[in-house]
Image (cartoon, rainbow, N blue to C red):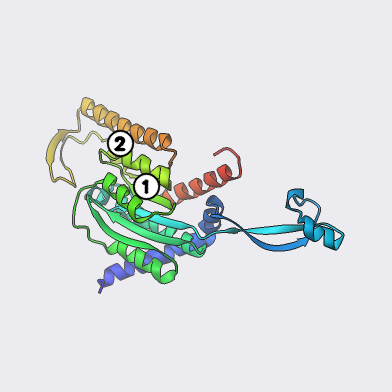
Amino acid sequence: MLPADVLRQVRRLHLRARRVVQTLLGGEYHSAFKGAGLSFEEVREYQPGDDVRSIDWNVTARAGHPFVKRYVEERELTLVLAVDVSASQKFGTGQLTKRAVAAELAALLALCAVSNNDRVGLLAFTTVVERFVPPNKGPRHVLRLLRDILAFDPQKPGTDLGAALDYLNKVQRRRAIVFLVSDFLADGYADAFRRAARKHDLIAVRTADPREAEWPAAGLVRLEDAETGRQVVVDAASRAFREGFAGRGRDRAGAFTKLARGARADLIDAGTDGRHFDALLKFFRQRDRRRQGGRA
């Protein structure tokens, strides 16, 4: 039985996400991701503007005037939310923590999938796969995912992106849309990332906090690595420290952006400033333009 405060969080997140999906994101999601193919629906009379390539010549010959075949898109997509629940995701100096941003985006994506009759599953990971919920449909299934995302207490603090992606490739044999939500503050996962991008439609959602890229002149500060517990005292008043810190952050972010582009995986940047819904909407619209053959 979940604690009452967690149940309240689940209900609050569900209501907020459902409102956004109904008013803004549901149609954008449908447009961004095309189905697995087309299925025949009907034959109807030709109308001006119809593609002549869709004319059914057999029916046209029998009827004596043109008829066209009409097809509809087969949705039946599979969405997998691969969510980093390591200790570094608890960090946040903006409106939210990175874990909260990940939870809200996962809730939105799950509800988008269900509202379009798509299947959605969850893979929560640290240095190990902490929880795997196979893709399924329906409102009750989504509520279970939301409970897992919000209430799940991971056993390990660290991150192993490579192990999580290799596990996903083994259990999800058919091609899926995979939203990989993480801060990507890890090493040694590049090959697994490329393998996952070849097998699936991989979208990396990079959670980040401004303090991970830039540090204020705050004097002596004790910092602790959330995943290892290692502590260090730094002089944030030092310009050299601040510039070096910012430079390392830019290098790390640039290296991952290069990896994603090289693997042809999409990338969404989701900060803790409360604008992560806007980032997701922008991504959906870019995907839709790409799908229609326009510029992303």
| Left or right: 160 in relation to 101 | left
| Left or right: 117 in relation to 216 | right
Quadrant in the rendering for residue 153: bottom left
Amino acid type at circle 2 is: Ala
Label at residue 175: none
Check the picture and name the quadrant holding the C terminus.
top right
Check the picture and name the quadrant holding the N terminus.
bottom left
Residue 81 in the image, given as x and y percentages of width and height:
38, 55
| Left or right: 47 in relation to 29 | right
- Mark whose residue sits in front, 1 or 2: 2
According to the picture, the residue beneath numbered tag 1 turns out to be: 273
Look at 27% across and 30% down and name the residue there.
248
- Bin the neighbour count of mark 2 within 10 Å (Cα to Cα): few under 14, some 14-19, many 20 and up: some
Residue 88 in the image, given as x and y percentages of width and height:
24, 47
Look at 74% across and 62% down and name the residue there.
43
Nearest to N terminus: mark 1 or mark 2: 2
Vertical placement of residue 243 versus 27, above or below: above
Residue 104 in the image, given as x and y percentages of width and height:
38, 57
| Residue lying at the far bottom of the rendered structure | 1
Look at 26% across and 71% down and name the residue there.
2
Look at 30% across and 42% down and name the residue there.
184
